[in-house]
Image (cartoon, rainbow, N blue to C red):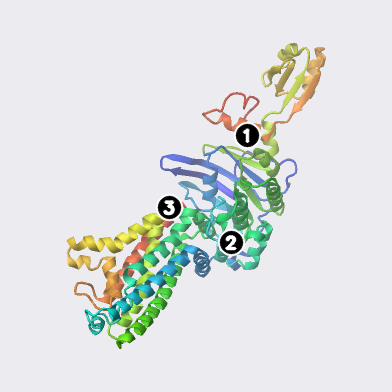
Amino acid sequence: MIEIRQLTKVYGRTSAVEDLTFAVRPGVVTGFLGPNGAGKSTTMRTIVGLDHPTAGETLVGGRPYAAHSAPMRVVGALLEANAVHPGRTAASHLRALAATHRIGRRRVEEVIGLVGLDEVAAKRAGTFSLGMAQRLGLAGALLGDPAVLILDEPVNGLDPDGIRWVRDLLRGLAREGRTVFISSHLMSEMALTADHLVVISRGRLLADVPMAEMIAAAGATVRIRSPRAADLAPLLAGRDVEVTAEGHEVLAVAGMTSVDIAETAFTHGIVLHELTPVQVSLEDAYLALTHEHTFYRAGEGLHAKGRAVA
Amino acid sequence: MTTGIDTDQGGHEMSAPVEDVRVVDPLATGITSRSVLASEWIKLRSLRSSWWSVITLVMSILLMGAFSAVGIVVQDSPPAAKAIAADPSGGALSGVDFFAQLAVVALGVLAVTGEYRTRMIRASFTAVPHRLLVVWAKAGVVAAVAAVISLVAVLLAFGISTAVLSIEDQAISLFEPGVARAVLGAAVVLGLTSVLGTAFGWLLRSTAGAVSALVGVLYLLPSVAVLVPDVVSRYLPGNAAAAVTQVTRSDTGPHPWVGLAVYAGYAALALALAAVVVRRRDA
């Protein structure tokens, strides 16, 4: 369990995080989303005591990180791949970290095997690709067999095999009852890995919802094709229903189920050639949510179908 | 749960709240100052830059010592006997005051700035959130390595000088007044200099910045300080250290033991300052 309580972090005159409160529960993978500069990394750094909060506090397992006698056994953190001295071998790097908690050589070799770095363990980390550096970072996070994992962009730089491996690993760890908190910009990957989402923007909480709810709230649309689309549109449009012409004889309807649409069309004797519920992707849902809260917009169309969650 | 919009979870999630798992009793394997020392020892010896600093340290002491001894032998003026009367160590320590100092400055500075440059420091402080343990452990490990290696190198240099000078039937001895003190003092001073190196590393976080600042304090400050009264300038770090490592006492320098105490004081002060800064700062 990770608890963020009224966390505020100000750098100079800009506040990276403002009065942020949420909790990350064990047993599920929680995704941490937000645009660049939203305060994700700051929040994660604060949890493990690298940054000092300006106000508020962060607790892990009910205590501040530094109050644990063996923090690596409680929290495994990967906040930056490449936070490794390039002149040190992978094995020496891990041994040095392990030594702080009197974690033995066997465990070091175990995590090296677990992340698949056996063959390069004796090589200097400076020669590693980004993907290998990520694996080394993950090995470091797993050293203490921690109950809580905090990973900033863990699949960054990994190949498809590596990405799948990390996904299975994280889901497996969550199933064991651990708390898994990850950030990523890869929405499709997050959609597959996370069960729950925390979304922030400009240092403030936008959403703290289960994945399914996030996508549902973004508003699934229904695609209709009908030769009398122009007649049907005004019949469907209403207070909570948004009808958009998507082309010749094609409508996109938001805020109405396909059943209701079919009934309405039948009542008025309008024939339908197509009636397709369209599931909104996490990416759409996320963009819709964050764009509402962002002053600059990347252009029209991106968020046309969106409705806010929080 | 304290806040948030989360209600019930859907789909494939677990329905009941799950307790945090704790696989190993944390009390059994917590952080201690010894475990952090062990970690810093692994870090120091697993980097090539440390080895280069140590090799430079040893070579500067051995080569400079040997050159001095050869110089005494081949030069006629002053005669060898007179030269040894002036410096009973036969120049065996001539590498200590500058070149060896530079080597241990590099050793101490790099142990810290290497972590900042590579962002390893974040991994280190995540593993050991009690940052001061890391500050003390780095200083301790670096100082021990610098002092032990220096002592061995200085004794070797003394042996080489003894052998070279025996060509001219001259003898030097560790038991002449001031010699043993200078030999041991050199090891302690070099250890303290490496501590100053770590402190400057913590304070400035850049290799170039920390090395230049510390070299400036040790070598430029005394030259500039001809302008200030003698009472002040004799206690400057560079002069205090020289009082310990030079066999023959200069008229202007402090008493060797006073010099050592003052130099140790500077190291302690710098490290304390570093500790304050490191604890406050975001990593």
User: Which label sits on residue A94?
Assistant: 2
Which chain is disc 2 placed on? A
* Mark-to-mark CA distance, 3 and 1: 34 Å
Task: Tell me if A105 is positioned left or right of B124 in this view.
Answer: right
Is disc 2 on the same chain as disc 1? Answer: yes
Q: Which mark is residue B281?
A: 3
Whole-number angstrom distance, CA of label 3 to CA of label 2: 25 Å
Residue B75 visible (yes or no):
yes
Q: Residues within 10 Å of mark 3 (few under 14, many from 20)?
A: few
Q: Residues within 10 Å of mark 1 (few under 14, many from 20)?
A: many
Where residue B126 appears, as percent x and y from the top left, is: 53, 56
- Mark linked to residue A286: 1
The residue depicted at 38 percent of the width and 75 percent of the height is: B62
Q: Chain of mark 1?
A: A
The residue under the point 50% across, 41% down is: A17
Distance from Cα at disc 1 to Cα at disc 2: 37 Å
Image coords of residue A158 (percent x, y): 64, 47
Residue A235, compared with residue B27, is above or below; it is above
Q: Looking at the picture, which amino acid does disc 1 mark? A: Tyr
Q: Which amino acid type is marked by label 2?
A: Leu
